[in-house]
Amino acid sequence: MNQTAPEQLTIWTFDWVPEGPRGYVRDLRLGWACEEAGLSYRVGSVPFEDRGAEHLAMQPFGQVPYLTDGDVSLFESGACLLHLSEKSETLMPRERALRAETVSWVLAALNSVEMFSVPWWFVGLSSPPENPLEGWLRARLAVLEDVLTARDWLVDGRFTAADLILADVLRPPWIRGIGDYPATDAYIDRICARPAFARAHADQIAHFSRADKTREA
């Protein structure tokens, strides 16, 4: 994580979160993208426990991340990721058809997979006899397993923003434990072994760990 001049990219996250979500807060997606692309950035923070007017002016739902880039401000991790991807061919191919395919997979990860995986997880917290979303989620995981059996990467035979976001959507252990998807498991393991992911993940853990010390003081 490069914490440099304020006019550079700033990824905004909470000043602290409980231990459970650490390593999974979605600002990690943006730090990971910057690390992959070699983009200089800094991390800013907003209060977790008192989400005031300044935060809501930037992210109307009081969530994170949001991103500032000079006079440009974006919220929602997918929108922020696409903005960062326009800055680097590492993340977004420049050929028109490949760019369209990358954008499609980024949105599919969010709208066709995460849209079911997160509610499925929330429903499961109450331990119902049957999770009504499980069939929907398994159907999507089966589609991905077929896709990832046939190819190592989603687009252009190489890593792109599409792989970054899909791997991040799929990597939580509560999702990975839902069934037997060997090609998908290998895909997630391969992408999360990338040094840029390791740096972004470690930076997020360190950010919240420093906040623990501040709260204890």
Image (cartoon, rainbow, N blue to C red):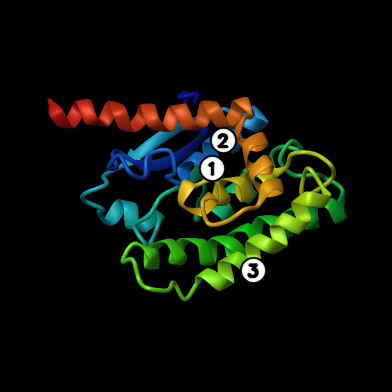
* 132 up-or-down from 176: above or below: below
Q: Nearer the viewer, mark 3 or mark 1?
A: 3
- Real-space Cα separation, disc 2 to disc 1, in angstroms: 5 Å
Quarter of the image containing the C terminus?
Answer: top left
Q: Which mark is first along the chain, 1 or 3?
A: 1
Residue carrying label 1 = 29
Q: Looking at the image, can residue 162 be seen? A: no
**Most foreground residue, 73 or 138:** 138
Residue 54 is situated, as x and y percent measured from the top left of the image, at 31, 52
The residue closer to the viewer here, 25 or 48, is 25
Position in image of residue 161 (x %, y %): 68, 45
Q: Are marks 2 and 1 in contact (CB under 8 Å)?
A: yes
Q: Position of residue 66 (x, y in %)?
A: 45, 49
Above-or-below relation of 185 to 74: above
Q: Earlier in the sequence, mark 2 or mark 3?
A: 2
Name the residue at 50% across, 72% down.
133
| Residue sitting at x 51%, y 62% | 117
Left-right relation of 94 to 11: right
Element assignment for label 2: helix
What mark, if any, has residue 139 been given in the picture?
3
